[in-house]
Image (tube, rainbow, N blue to C red):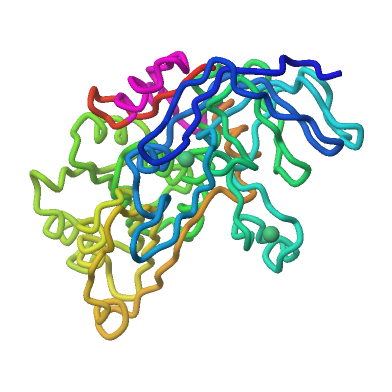
Amino acid sequence: MANYPKTMKALVAYSKTDYRFEGAYPSPECGDDDIIIKTEACGICAGDLKCQHGAAMFWGDEVQPSWVKPPFIPGHEFLGRIVDMGKNVTGWKIGDRVTADQIVPCGECRFCKSGKYWMCQPHNIFGFQTANNGGMAEYVRYPKTAVIYPVPEDLPLEKALLIEPYGCSKHAVDRGNIQCDDIVVISGAGTLGLGMVTYAALKHPKALISLDMDDKRLAKAKEFGATHIFNPGKRDIQKEIEALTDGYGCDVYIEATGHPSSVIQGLGVIRKLGTFVEFSVFSAPATVDWSIIGDRKELDIYGSHLSPYCFPFVIDGIASGALKTDGVIRTILKLEEWEKGFEYAAGKYGDLKVALVP
Ligand SMILES: [Zn+2]
Ligand SMILES: [Zn+2]
């Protein structure tokens, strides 16, 4: 007999125009290899917002096929406590506080077998398909291959909710391979950009420059370790960075805004032979002059996806305070208020990360 109710509260996406709060949605079933957790809370990601707004990259259009598999329960930034386990599960016990990587690796493809599980070929992710329902519900099923980590008992919820986003931040910064004498630009000071700033600061680059159109976010970036902050809406970024680099340009540019203009800006302010890291998800293609990348600057361009092997460091860093989190989550609402939550998460009222409690 299961240790949890047969139905639960859940936000369910039936189609791109039909997201519904359900008071008695079927709870996940616990198979022999599964773990069931009771959700403590779930953060709202920009991806969840884009999906709810009907973005083509999720729901498809004339040029791309639909990627989501409705009905599904959104949310991949969640944690909770184990309430049930299948008979084959070892290493965990009922009551353990846990979280998991966003990806649910297949364990069998070429990428999984070579340790590159975050690029798993089938690419199942929590919160976008029926088979891997996400954290905007009272109960979530972790299948056998889920990458699960313990969360310290005394880690406050508003900090623990940043484990997944900061994991993604860490991976993006690691891709930039920052050296002590580098001048680093991180474009975008939302939750992910701030996570990048606080982590990159631990690497003590020569200068750490945060760019954002919002001065409040820039102030937070300064608090989190940025040595310089600039608002591209008010300052000539090209000039500012040239002044700081004897006219050469920055060594590393990490793009975390999701706006094509930030890509063009980055290609302009980066030095020859520099390192450009692309983290964002764009709602429209970014059109740039590729001759800058090859002929003019011979750049190293790196992509960054998810948070492979990042959780242990991030959990320790958040718990010790080495990674700064103050004020990133200030709004936690009930799941019933998801519409309000999504609205707040869009940044309308100055919020960075917003979370829902089922
Ligand atoms: Zn996310
Ligand atoms: Zn795989």
Quadrant hosting residue 326: top left
- Kindly tell me whether residue 225 is visible in this rendering: no
Residue 331 coordinates in the image, percent (x, y): 38, 17
Residue 183 coordinates in the image, percent (x, y): 32, 57
Quadrant hosting residue 92: top right
Relative placement, left or right, of 167 versus 208 is right
Residue at point 35%, 66% (across, down): 63
Residue at point 50%, 46% (across, down): 168
Residue at point 34%, 29% (across, down): 345
Relative height, residue 262 to residue 89 (above, below): below
Relative placement, left or right, of 26 versus 245 is right
Relative placement, left or right, of 197 versus 266 is right
Looking at the rendering, the stretch of residues picked out in magenta corresponds to 320-345
> Can you tell me which quadrant of the image ligand 2 is in?
bottom right
User: Closest to the observer: 257 or 228?
Assistant: 257
Residue 82 coordinates in the image, percent (x, y): 75, 23
User: Closest to the observer: 21 or 121?
Assistant: 21
